Image: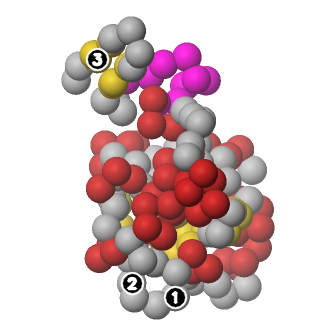
């Protein structure tokens, strides 16, 4: 775990916290390129209450936790199918068909994972990012 700082950039591992309300650097909202903003508009964002309602009515998406395995070990949705950090998520981490529910700690890494999967060719209509991540799920 190291932090490198220059006059223009700061690089840190996602184990370190900064002053983003307990979020890691990877979870901090940052400015993104136009292509990423367009991609964000194409996947679904789902609130925890809406997600729970859909699940109670029989929705059974593939559930992907895009946090680190150590974070997953601390707290996770009990119906998680796979854990793959958002930076390394690959097409083979999700099934070829069906909906995919993606979650992280606060929702930001989930968005990044959705965008990455879209870039890798996954149909954005299949992807659902849990808004607010597991933190908001626990609150609601």
Label 1 or label 3, whichever comes before in sequence order: 3
| Residue denoted by label 1 | 98
Q: Residue furthest left?
A: 1
Label 2 or label 3, whichever comes before in sequence order: 3
Q: Is residue 72 visible?
A: no
Distance, label 1 to label 3, CA atoms, is 39 Å
Q: Main secondary structure of the magenta part?
A: strand
Q: Secondary structure at mark 3?
A: strand
| Residue denoted by label 2 | 95
- The residue drawn where x is 49% and y is 48% is 109
Work out whether residue 92 or residue 59 is closer to the camera in this orientation and state it: 92
Work out whether residue 110 or residue 65 is closer to the camera in this orientation and state it: 110
Answer few, some or many: residues within 10 Å of disc 2's Cα (few below 14, many 20 plus, some between 14 and 19): few
Per the rendered image, the range of residues in magenta is 16-24
Which quadrant is the N terminus positioned in? top left
Position of residue 30 relative to residue 42, above or below, is above
| Residue denoted by label 3 | 3
- The residue drawn where x is 36% and y is 33% is 14
For the image shown, how many numbered marks are present on the structure?
A: 3
Q: Which image quadrant for residue 139? A: top right
Marks 1,2: beta carbons within 8 A: yes
Q: Which image quadrant for residue 96? A: bottom left
């Amino acid at each position: 775990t190291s932090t490198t700082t220059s006059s223009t950039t700061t690089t840190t591992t996602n184990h370190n916290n900064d002053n983003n309300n307990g979020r890691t650097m990877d979870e901090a909202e940052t400015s993104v390129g136009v292509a990423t903003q367009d991609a964000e508009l194409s996947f679904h964002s789902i609130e925890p209450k809406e997600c729970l309602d859909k699940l109670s009515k029989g929705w059974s998406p593939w559930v992907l936790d895009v946090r680190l395995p150590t974070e997953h070990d601390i707290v996770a949705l009990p119906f998680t199918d796979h854990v793959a950090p958002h930076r390394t998520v690959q097409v083979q981490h999700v099934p070829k068909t069906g909906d995919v529910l993606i979650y992280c700690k606060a929702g930001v890494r989930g968005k990044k994972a959705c965008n990455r999967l879209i870039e890798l060719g996954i149909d954005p209509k299949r992807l659902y990012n849990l808004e607010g991540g597991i933190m908001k799920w626990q609150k609601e």
